[in-house]
Image (tube, rainbow, N blue to C red):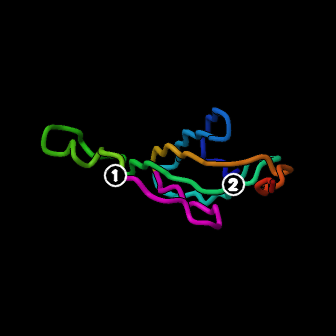
């Protein structure tokens, strides 16, 4: 885990939720998104990444709207400098075999 990332995780069934802050105001941080014992099937991220010295007011509030992005199949992600990102990963147990339909 890159040292500038502050991560909190939670889980509901086969969905993993990460809340990630890149605390560096100048350096992006690259990470591999993986959950021990699980296979990651897909992921989405909602990212807020603006200049950390942006003065927030009525003219600039649009910059703080989260941008939705798809996590690539490689599960490699770059968290921009001074960003906050919510990540949703759809997973399954790595030992779970694919079930084939029963035949009569």
Left or right side of 75 for 50: left
| Closer to the camera in the image, 101 or 36 | 101
Give how far apart the Cα atoms at labels 1 and 2 are: 31 Å
Left or right side of 79 for 104: right
Q: Residue at x 42, y 49 (%)?
A: 47
Q: Is residue 93 magenta?
A: no
Left or right side of 60 for 83: right
| Closer to the camera in the image, 82 or 87 | 87
Q: Residue 89: horizontal and vertical position, in percent?
A: 60, 48
How packed mark 1 is, by other alpha carbons closer than 10 Å (few <14, some 14-19, many 20 or more), is few
Q: Secondary structure at mark 1?
A: loop
Q: Which label lies toward us, 1 or 2?
A: 2
Residue that extends furthest to the right in the rendered view of this protein: 95
Q: Which residue is mark 1?
A: 51
Q: Secondary structure at mark 2?
A: strand
| For marks 1 and 2 on the same chain, the one whose residue lies earlier in the sequence | 2
Q: Which quarter of the rendered picture does the C terminus lie within?
A: bottom right
Q: How many numbered marks are there?
A: 2
* Magenta part of the chain: 67-81
Q: Residue at x 35, y 46 (%)?
A: 66
Q: Which residue is mark 2?
A: 40
| Closer to the camera in the image, 71 or 83 | 71
Q: Residue 54: horizontal and vertical position, in percent?
A: 28, 46
Q: Is residue 80 magenta?
A: yes
Against 100, residue 89 (above or below) is: above
Q: Residue at x 75, y 54 (%)?
A: 39
Q: Residue at x 83, y 54 (%)?
A: 97
């Amino acid at each position: 885990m890159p040292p500038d990332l502050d991560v909190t995780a939670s889980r509901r069934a086969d969905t993993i939720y990460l809340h990630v802050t890149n605390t560096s105001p100048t350096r992006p941080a690259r990470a591999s998104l993986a959950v021990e014992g699980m296979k990651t099937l897909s992921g989405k991220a909602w990212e807020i990444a603006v200049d950390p010295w942006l003065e927030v007011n009525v003219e600039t509030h649009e910059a703080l709207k989260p941008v939705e992005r798809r996590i690539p199949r490689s599960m490699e992600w770059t968290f921009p400098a001074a960003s906050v990102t919510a990540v949703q990963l759809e997973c399954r147990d790595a030992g779970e075999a694919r079930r084939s339909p029963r035949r009569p």
